[in-house]
Amino acid sequence: MESSACKASSRALGFPKGHAEEGENPYETAARELKEETSLYIVEQLDSFPLQENYLFRKKDIIVYKLVDYFLASVGGKVEILKKELSDFEWVNLPEAKEKVTFKEAKKLCAEIENRLKIPL
């Protein structure tokens, strides 16, 4: 089982994500962002319940709370990253992803993926 890891600009290594457009549900947002950022498309959703990541960050003088829904899916297509969104993309297996992702929240996501798919890391 492999997972994707993306680097936005030259910052952190994590998973594809983005903001919802008007009228989109979380799954539609995830599918659109994946396609826009990587040219990949969802072939099959593997679990109907999203994985959730939440964290705080500072934007200028404001503290922002962020909640992100991720969906387990098999994907198709050829990776072509959109350079204005990402500086890098790589396929890694789950144990590698857990080691390579930058933030503890993303490491927790890897553990949750393992739990959902019953794959030992």
Image: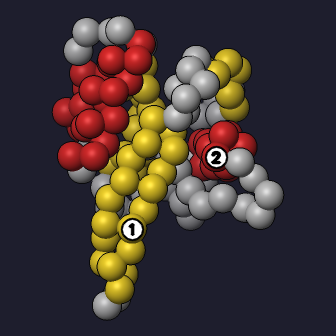
Does 24 sit left or right of 87 as displayed?
right
Does 45 sit left or right of 6 as displayed?
right
**Judging from the image, what secondary structure is the residue with disc 2 in?**
helix
Real-space CA distance between mark 1 and mark 2, rounded to the nearest whole angstrom: 17 Å
Mark 1 residue type: Tyr
Residue at 72 percent across and 43 percent down: it is: 28
Rendered position, 89 above or below 117: below
Rendered position, 91 above or below 24: above
Q: Is residue 14 visible?
A: yes
Mark 2 residue type: Pro
Rendered position, 74 above or below 21: above
Residue at 38 percent across and 74 percent down: it is: 64
| Residue under label 1 | 65
**Image quadrant occupied by the N terminus:** top left
Mark toward the start of the polypeptide (1 vs 2)? 2
**Quarter of the view holding residue 78:** top right
Indicate the position of residue 77 as horizontal and vertical percent values: 68, 26
| Residue under label 2 | 26
**Judging from the image, what secondary structure is the residue with disc 1 in?**
strand
